[in-house]
Image (spheres, rainbow, N blue to C red):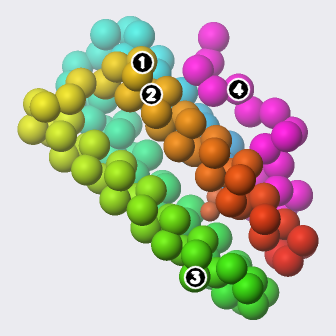
Amino acid sequence: MALFQWNNSFSVNNSEIDKQHQKLVELVNSLHDAMSQGKSKDVLGKIFNDLIIYTKSHFKSEENLMLNKNYPDYTAHRLEHQKLTNQVIKLKAEFDAGKVVISIELLNFLKDWLKKHILETDKKYMPFVN
Ligand SMILES: [Fe+2]
Ligand SMILES: [Fe+2]
């Protein structure tokens, strides 16, 4: 079973952004699957890296959308994106250095990291961007 099940409560009523969030969920699930199957560090590292790259591009497109719509909380939202990005980059560096391994705790952290941001922060821009 997938670690992270997408459901409509995550929707921000913007099909493009929903698609991007679904892709992020999929990447977290892929990392979980690869871990469960005992894949090599190289394979795990590659998926982890894809997750970071896709997260950055998603944040960028959300920021552009908020800017275009003159979203009043743009700055605070962008700051949260930067914080989240730094957290995940730090984790990846620790993983590369062999200081952390991909574990269920780490995956739950990534899941909650994403879930909380979508439900608590992204949802706030809904009335402005749709
Ligand atoms: Fe988002
Ligand atoms: Fe966001």
Amino acid type of the residue that numbered disc 1 sits on in the rendered structure: Ile
Looking at the rendering, the stretch of residues picked out in magenta corresponds to 1-18
Query: Badge 3 is on which residue?
Result: 75
Mark in front: 3 vs 1: 3
Residue 92 located left or right of residue 18: left
Q: Nearer the viewer, residue 31 or 81?
A: 81
Residue 7 located left or right of residue 105: right
Q: Residues within 10 Å of mark 4 (few under 14, many from 20)?
A: few
Amino acid type of the residue that numbered disc 2 sits on in the rendered structure: Leu
Query: Badge 4 is on which residue?
Result: 5
- Number of the label disc, if any, that sits on residue 42: none
Mark in front: 4 vs 3: 3
Q: Tell whether label 1 touches label 2 (CB within 8 Å).
A: yes
* Residue 120 drawn above or below residue 80: above
**Alpha carbon of mark 4 to alpha carbon of mark 1: how far?**
16 Å
* Residue 39 drawn above or below residue 92: above
Residue 9, horizontal then vertical, whole percent? 85, 40
Q: Quadrant of ligand 1?
A: bottom right
Instruction: Tell me the quarter of the picture where residue 13 sits.
Output: bottom right
Q: Tell whether label 1 touches label 3 (CB within 8 Å).
A: no
